[in-house]
Image (cartoon, grey):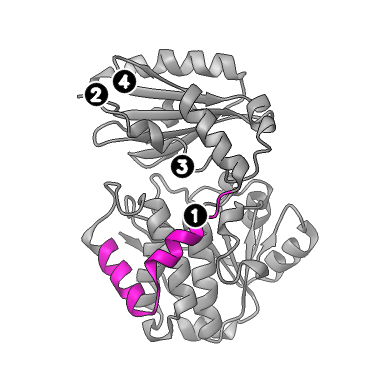
Amino acid sequence: MQDTIKHNLQELRKHSGRIVITTHHKPDGDAMGSTLGLYHYFKNAGVESQVVTPTDYAEFLHWLPGSDTVLVYEEDTTHSKELIDNAAYVFCLDFNALGRINDMGEYIKKSDATLVMIDHHQDPQDFDHERFVEIGASSACELVYRYVQIHLDPNLMTKAMGECIYTGLITDTGSFRFGSTTSSTMRTAADLMDLGVIPDRIYRSLFDQNRLERLQLLGYFLANKIELIEDGKVALAHMTADELNKYNVITGDTEGFVNYGLGIKGVQMSALIIDRDYLVKMSFRSAEHFPCNEFSAEFFNGGGHKNAAGGANEDSLENTLAKFKKSIKTYKNHFK
């Protein structure tokens, strides 16, 4: 644990209205859960804050309490910059490198605000002034919960905060299935239930509100797009830009697709490679020993966690697939 937090709740109240909370581009459940969770805590504690995301986020997260208050930087850059210019504190949640927030990164770097990092990814950059970081923790949401417990006043937590934090717990742990789930994670979940969080309601809101087109895409994906390589130890899937357009894919529609490969008997590493027109994006998942983060960092300008990482490539989809198949052979010693 890296804990260099200097501020307290009294200090934050002095700067009410000058607090910005942000997270990485294309925010997932942990990103939006942590930012909105902290927003709700501050609101109940008498600290006015504003969540600013670099980009939009998946429709299945729009139910989160407070989602209607979120400001999207790329949609309202002028107002976002004004808030950052005036900020006394900028909370940076679920990312540890300014490149993860696109154009916002350079702007925040020039800010006079105190930058507070709360994150769980490896190799944090030194752009922050204060940090609450535990590499390998289950989620940023778990760390936000612990940050409030240790440095602020846990008695001011609310059900709305709890619903947001619980969302990040289950999305980043695969509903508590991933190896990052610890006894601390489960105790956090239990505490959130004591706040009034109803787990099955959260689950239904996240996973049982699919568009028909997304389910049709998933069916097509499972029937046609997964191949096994490396003696059945690696599941490799890819989607072309034309396929995405055919099913009218929107942000979040392919969320979780990479996990299906790990459900195949004998598979130890699953990869999903998607042509986004402007960039080829990759998601990697593994069971136990395979270091997705190391593999991604070495070959695909990425990173993340041992069992869950992402990457990108500016080359064509065809060349990226060829590079993946060649690169994965150099990691054979990581397979059991």
Q: Which residue is mark 4?
A: 331
User: In the rendered structure, which amino acid carries the disc numbered 3?
Assistant: Gly
Q: Residues at badges 2 and 1 in contact (C-beta under 8 Å)? A: no
- Please tell me whether mark 2 or mark 3 is closer to you in this view: 3
Res. 245 image quadrant:
top right
3D distance between C-alphas at marks 2 and 4: 8 Å
Label 2 SS: loop
Q: Which residue is mark 3?
A: 256
Q: Residues at badges 1 and 3 in contact (C-beta under 8 Å)? A: no
3D distance between C-alphas at marks 4 and 3: 24 Å
Question: In the visual, does 53 lie left or right of 220?
Answer: right
Question: In the visual, does 320 lie left or right of 68?
Answer: left
User: In the rendered structure, which amino acid carries the disc numbered 2?
Assistant: Phe
3D distance between C-alphas at marks 2 and 3: 23 Å
- Please tell me whether mark 1 or mark 3 is closer to you in this view: 1
Q: Position of residue 201 (x, y in %)?
A: 44, 66
Label 3 SS: loop
Q: Quick one: label 4, few (<14), some, or many (20+) residues within 10 Å?
A: few
Furthest residue toward right: 78
3D distance between C-alphas at marks 2 and 1: 34 Å
Q: Quick one: label 3, few (<14), some, or many (20+) residues within 10 Å?
A: few
Label 1 SS: loop
Q: Quick one: label 1, few (<14), some, or many (20+) residues within 10 Å?
A: few
- Please tell me whether mark 4 or mark 3 is closer to you in this view: 3
Q: Residue 335: which disc?
A: 2
| Dot placed on the residue nearer the N-terminal end, 2 or 1 | 1
